[in-house]
Amino acid sequence: MRKWILILIGLSLSCGSQPEKLVLLITLDTTRADRIGCYGSRDAITPHLDRVAGKGLQFARAWTPVPVTLPAHTSIMTGLTPPVHGVRDNGTFRLAENAVTLAELLADGGYETAAFISAYPLAEEFGLSQGFHFWDGGIRTTENIHNPEFTLYDQRTAGEVTDQAIQYLKGRREGRLFLWVHYFDPHGAYAPPEPWATRFRNSPYDGEIAYADNEIGRLLDAAHREFGGADRLTIITADHGEGLGRHDEKSHGVFIYETTMRVPLIIIGAGIEPGLSPDRVGLIDIAPTILEWTGISGPDWIEGVSLLGPIPDRPVYLESFHSRFSYGWSGIQGVIWNNRKYILTAAPENYDLESDPGETGDLGGEWPREAREALDRTGTRKARFGESYDPDDAARKKLLALGYVTGKTGEQELDPTVGSAPRVEMPLARRMIDGYRAMRDGRKAEASRLFEEILTLDSTRSGAHLALASVQRSRGLYGDAETSLEAAIRFRPAEVEPYLNLAELRTDRGDLESAVDLLREGLIHVVQPATLCYQAALISHEAGEATEAIEWLEKAIALDWTNFQAMNLLAWILLEEGIDTEVAVGWARRASEGSPERADFFDTYGLALYRAGEPEQALIPLGRAVELDPENASYAERLENARHAAAER
């Protein structure tokens, strides 16, 4: 309720006669500072960024706290490091509702707030939309003709995002506005449009940055046209960089070397002295900077500092646990102190950034006390707001299509010294990543070869067995796929996914009894047995064994009281069998309350009320189902039937 009050207050204040102000935050995805002209690149074509840097305040040494899109942007929007805001990876975390974001504070202070997002890792479901009056997450999705397993590419181009943001700006010449525009283009796969594709045919990554720069120029021109007479603050930065093959990392997310951690940061605005700052700064400093410029107070727990005054000499905290969550290796934490970078992982590292900016010579040795204390102060702090998030299969495919392998967060150990060191594991991981990309692009034979090479080097790699099984199944090699899945289970018996995939394979060939037996066996081993119970219920239901399906669902719910899909299916089967309508109403209500975005859950709840002789009450959930999925004819028909029944009472 508090959030809605803040938004209403913000709307009412924005309609008043306040001095005009525009705060424009531009975030580039996957953009290395050293590939921009004003940061020293001789090959870059970035005239608009260079022009802003020449007139504004450019920070020569700025770092992201984490080389992953969602947690990095969460740090921008909260002023907190990942251990404190609690969002540690893409896809499997979300910012909790009780968080206090920059957008909420500005809305409460009388600003209209709007965001234009260009990729799925920042989708509304992950929590960063809170506080925005207008959120444009209209991400373009296209079908992958090469491989249905990678159906969705959830992103849109810089041109599309800029067009929408400019349309929004038109006519907004009064009041106060906070506008956030996110450009995903420099992220792989690199495919700039013409003329940049031709100009940068040998370095398409730089072409993507040049294209994004062009669109930033269009956006800045529009902001000047619409808010030319207003006080303006513009901040341009990136969420992280890109490995481009250095340190055996083509993209980003695993390591915390400078290639993925150093980012551009440029500020220009009324009252800001232009120049080049040598201070060590970070993305956590953006929120407090905006708050000071707008004169709005923030919570005292913000870790960042305003960049508009004296900047203290502080250690810079760095981390990535993507390798822990996605691959089961050790995570990585680090700190920069006195031009030295100290990296804590299963194989610790130590670099002198002044004499060795490429981090090629690990100095080893003991950490100084100040560096260890600085890491302990931040790295071990308790999360305030982040919460785990279990994406469904569609969400995982969206993330995988963009190159993000998502694992399960669960109660995983976040001690960075536990597990195998990522730099030891990375050569095999590169083959895995290349294999996933070959799968995505429909190069099935190449994908099989890469996964088989991994298993030749290390036959215990459950993930490689699992991926190979997916390719084999897509090629019609069902016997080989079953063998691969059995191997995946043998080496990682606690993992749920191999059991689910093998059960699905057996179900497809009509061996339902064997599929259920497999899932029953898995209950002894897996860490998430409720998932297997639900799958067994689906198979039993398909086989016409309603009683057995009900037993499996009751077991799933007993194991996990947040398994709302099990509750919904249980309600549906009870209605189908005419066993106990009142019990069905209770389970359907709980499912719809737990998953308010699921149209099918509201449809089940409405049908249960209708069957219970309450058509008037059924109108609300049935109407919600139609609202969420207006194209579904069955939902519309049930709503119409309930209206007729209610009218006749």
Image: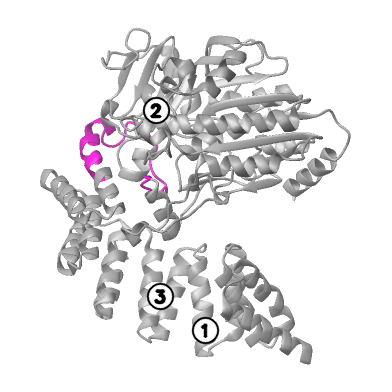
Task: Locate the C terminus by quadrant.
Answer: bottom right
In this rendering, which labeled residue sits more in front, label 2 or label 3? 2
Q: Is residue 422 magenta?
A: yes
In this figure, which residue is indicated by the disc labeled 3? 552
Q: Is residue 435 above or below residue 604?
A: above
Give the amino acid at mark 2: Thr
Q: Which mark is residue 574?
A: 1
Q: Residue furthest top?
A: 355
Q: Residue at x 77, y 38 (%)?
A: 172
Give the amino acid at mark 1: Leu
Task: Sort mark 2 into few (<14), some (14-19) or many (20+) by Cα contacts within 10 Å.
Answer: many
In this rendering, which labeled residue sits more in front, label 1 or label 2? 2
Task: Sort mark 1 into few (<14), some (14-19) or many (20+) by Cα contacts within 10 Å.
Answer: many
Q: Residue furthest right?
A: 17
Task: Residue 155 in the image: state x and y as whole percent.
Answer: 48, 47
Residue extent of the magenta highlight: 403-432
User: Sequence-wise, which precedes: disc 1 or disc 2?
Assistant: 2
Task: Residue 306 in the image: state x and y as whole percent.
Answer: 64, 19
Of 438 and 513, nearer the camera is 438
In this figure, which residue is indicated by the disc labeled 2? 260
Q: Taken as a whole, is the magenta stretch helix, strand or loop? A: loop
Q: Which mark is residue 26?
A: none
Q: Residue at x 24, y 39 (%)?
A: 430
Q: Report whether residue 303 is seen.
A: no
Task: Residue 346 in the image: state x and y as whole percent.
Answer: 29, 30
Q: Is residue 596 magenta?
A: no
